[in-house]
Amino acid sequence: MKKILVVAAMFLITAAATYLASCNNNSSTISAEDKAKDSIAKVIERGSYLANNVAACIHCHSKRDFTKYAGPNTPGSEGGGGDVFDHNILDAIPGTLYGKNITPDPETGLGSWTDEQIMRAITQGISKNGDTLFPLMPYANFNRMAKDDLLSIIAYLKTLKPIKNKVPDRQLMIPISMAYPAPFLQPSVDGNTRPAETDLVKYGEYITTMADCGTCHTAFVKGQPDMSKAFGGGNTFHIGDTRVTSANITPDSTGIGAWTEDMFLKKFTMYREEKAHNYNPGNKNNVMPLVSYAGMTDSDLKAIYAYLRTIKPVSNKVEKYPQ
């Protein structure tokens, strides 16, 4: 009898140990799966932040409502493209361009594109079918982005609601070869790294480049940006009845030389409140996507400010709303 009890006890102990080990293994497996899901979620979250608030992909590839200040995106149009960019808006644009559909719609968007094809378009300006994109899309800037940031944007774009919207073809008045910035493009982004956020100036340059501040805030002369006056402002945009000129954001007295960091931040953070932009400004509107950029973190805005304080001052007093 004792022998039977001992055998039974050993069986129960072995069974319990096996069960507990099985539970631990399942727990470990679930934990690994959770970690993977959490990692993917963080990648998409990073991509959403960059696409919406820094690189402004969604701003350019959606419809904008200019009956409100700074033309916030029209809800429901995110990534669907179709917005018009032409010489009526800015003289330097040689023709008529349209924001492409970058939603995952398989027929009219990016649904049939591979990650590699999307990456090539973002960083080299070459579409899936081999067409060269006009550099109004700042792929020369995106060409300098860290690869993990680029992949996070691609991951996020795939989560957008598919919108079936066939965008018209562009009409250019010059050969695309005249505009393609080949000398400035690296053949690969594999070696690109994101500067440490603790290096405010270097990291600020990275964010400023990604946000493409230089394009709008550098005056164009005969269709080309005057890099001797980089960030000095002076481009006049036409939006409906509004004529608005881009500001001088260099550290000159005619630019932001007297601005404190807090003043610079408030220029953006005030638009985090809907009341700051949800009104009809009449002929005193603004083309700058302030509502999108308002979503940048305070630390990223501070980094941009730190970088702008280091660039060459340009003396250029800008009249925001010229007659």
Image (cartoon, grey):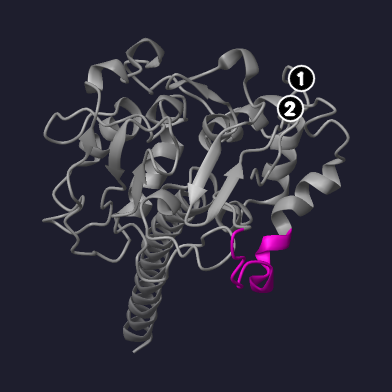
The quarter of the picture where residue 175 lies is top left
Please tell me which residue lies in front, 167 or 2: 167
Percent across and percent down for residue 287 are 54, 50
Q: Is residue 193 above or below residue 271?
A: above
Q: Residue 138 in the image: state x and y as whole percent.
A: 41, 32
- The span picked out in magenta is 270-283
Residue assigned mark 2: 250
Task: Please provide percent x and percent y for residue 131.
Answer: 16, 30
Q: Inspect the image, locate mark 1, and give the three-letter code of the amino acid beneath it.
A: Pro
- Find out whether the residues at labels 1 and 2 contact each other: C-beta distance under 8 Å: yes
- 50 on left or right of 119: right
x, y percentage for residue 17? 40, 70
Q: Quadrant of residue 24?
A: bottom left
Residue 313's mark? 1
Relative horizontal placement of residue 295, taking residue 118 as reference (left or right) = right
Q: Residue at x 34, y 19 (%)?
A: 188
- Residue type (three-letter) at the residue carrying disc 2: Thr
**Position of 300 relative to 307 (above/below):** below
282 in the magenta segment:
yes
Pick out the residue farthest to the front. 323
SS label for mark 1: loop
Above/below status of 200 relative to 26: above
The answer to whether residue 257 shows anywhere in this view is yes
Between disc 1 and disc 2, whose residue precedes? Answer: 2
Seen in the image, is 305 located left or right of residue 258? Answer: left
Rendered image: mark on residue 248:
none
